[in-house]
Amino acid sequence: MRKVKGKEVSYAKYGYLFIAPFFIAFLIFQFIPLIQTIYYSFFEYYRSGLKIIGPNPVGLANYSALFEADFGRYAGNTIIMWIIGFVPQIIISLLLAAWFTDIRLKIKGKQFFKVVIYMPNLIMASAFAMLFFALFSDNGPVNTTLVSMGILSKPFRFLSSVWGTRGLVGLMNFLMWFGNTTILLMAAVMGINPSLFEAAELDGCSPRQTFFRVTLPMIRPILVYVLITSMIGGLQMFDVPQILTNGKGTPDRTSMTLIMYLNNHLFSKNYGMAGAVSVILFIIAAILCLAVYFTLNADDDSKRVRKRDRFKPRKEAVNG
């Protein structure tokens, strides 16, 4: 803002002009479809052959039918496969981030290792799934190698085993995303004031104590971000199990995810049920994200309250 001949000129309108395209695109392509999805979830709206049924209002019938079906089972499948991939992902990423940012280790070729770690994230999930389908098939290279080495007496049917299929899905998610998580955590660690590490070293802290007492508390905001985004991505898991199991969630639908279940309703043109699945998925994601956020930030809030209460009597004494 500046003055021209006694008048104040505001440049705020230019700021609104620059951010307008984002909000217009968000309104058209995200907000309006979201409202329509919620609206049609209360309607009977599907196609039967060439005939379109509805939209006829049915209230909460779609939601009740959803919970009477195997929705809970598919939600459990999704969470299990997400945990299988996320737990090793966050552990390996934290270790790599701590090692690559530790000055005392003097690791050479850090940029090369960063590129190598991040490269799996550039590969399409469909290509990853097809690769693993070929590697872990009954007569694939993995089974051939294990049998020839005498580790297995006969080929193990990974794709016909419940935990074999779930393990492959979790392994693929781990390989695709641990590089991205490592880069984020490395940036977070590098943003910590080096004087904190120097003070910890002068106080005689071991590397393990420094990691748990200094590094982890300081990168908590990034950890919250990684956990929330990974959780949302896990709930939206689709392409890997879809291609690996040919959309059937075999064996016995134990690898069927929520989005695969949603896709089946969209494929059958049952828009009402698909809308109900989408709304419930949105609610689950929102609840989990809020729970994670408030749980991981509860300690910081309590510390601020204690600090404020500590200085409050002193201020009152000064004012008195």
Image (cartoon, rainbow, N blue to C red):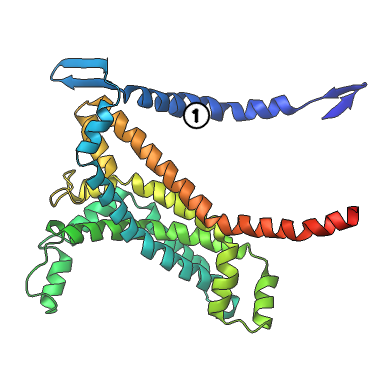
Q: Quadrant of the C terminus?
A: bottom right
Q: Is residue 106 visible?
A: no
Residue farthest toward the bottom in the current orientation of the protein:
204
Q: Is residue 161 above or below residue 71?
A: below
Classify residue 174 by image quadrant. bottom left
Tell me what residue is drawn at x 36 percent, y 26 percent.
37
Residue holding disc 1 = 26
Relative to the observer, which residue lies in front, 144 or 306?
306
Residue 293 on image: x %, y %:
51, 51
Classify residue 13 by image quadrant. top right
Q: Is residue 127 visible?
A: yes
Residue farthest toward the front in the current orientation of the protein:
320
Give the crowd class for mark 1: few <14, some 14-19, many >=20 residues within 10 Å: few
Residue farthest toward the left in the current orientation of the protein:
154
Q: Amino acid at mark 1?
A: Phe
Tell me what residue is drawn at x 21 percent, y 35 percent.
264
Q: Is residue 31 above or below residue 134?
A: above
Q: Is residue 190 above or below residue 54?
A: below
Residue 222 on image: x %, y %:
54, 56
